[in-house]
Image (tube, helix red, strand yellow):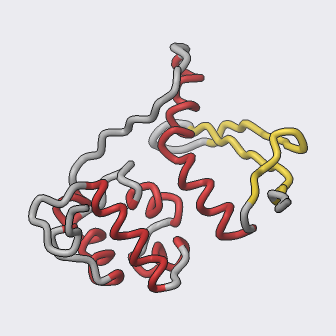
Amino acid sequence: MKDLTMSEDITKEDVTVLIIRAKKKAGLTWEAIAEKIGMSAVWTHSAAMGMNAFTEEKAKALVALLDLPEEATDAMVESPTKVWQQTVPTDPCIYRLYEIVGVYGPTIKALIHEKFGDGIMSAIDFDMTVERVANPKGDRVKIEMSGKYLDYNAW
């Protein structure tokens, strides 16, 4: 395995491994990390997983917070390639929802586990609303989902 502490050609994938290790060692939640670097937990996790690019300022803040090698900053500010392995519908509206889950699914999962434990959000005991929200930059689509939390059973 490659030495991830001092590599000059460190990749986004390498940085993700370093972040997860450092987060675990520090005993921090994504919420705490996000608060300390001035971002939301959803965005911070997504960027830490390589699905978004940090600004240089936020990358440096995360490097300092988690005591990562300085070389990690360069990889963190690179534009990501957002790829996941699924067959995706071609309808533009449905495709965008798949894109959201593909990009933010691991983030949603991580935050559910931090807040509730090892489990899932039910899609059976579930409700959702879709609203139009006025915005000067163009109206927004607001999708709110609420599902019962279900623990995994140990057996």
Residue 12 locus on image (x, y percent)? 27, 55
Q: How many marks?
A: 0
Please report the residue visible at 27 percent of the width from the left and 69 percent of the height from the top: 59
Nearer to us in this view, 60 or 7 = 7
Residue 74 located left or right of residue 97? left
Quadrant containing the C terminus in the rendered view: bottom right
Q: Residue at x 36, y 64 (%)?
A: 17
At horizontal 75% and vertical 58% (from top left) the residue drawn is 119
Q: Is residue 129 left or right of residue 40?
A: right
Residue most extreme to the right:
125
Residue 154: % across, % down: 82, 62
**Going by the image, does 84 lie left or right of 151?**
left
Residue most extreme to the left: 8
Residue 5 image position (x, y, % from top left)? 21, 75
Q: Residue 63: which quarter of the image?
A: bottom left
Residue 148 rendering spot, x and y as whole percentages: 86, 53
In this view, the residue farthest toward the top is 90
Tell me: 85 left or right of 55.
Answer: right
- Residue nearest the viewer, comparing 141 with 2: 2
Q: Quadrant of residue 2?
A: bottom left
Q: 117 and 90: which one is in front? A: 117
Residue at 25%, 47% (x, y): give it: 79
- Quadrant of residue 111 within the rendered picture: bottom right
Quadrant of the drawing holding the N terminus:
bottom left
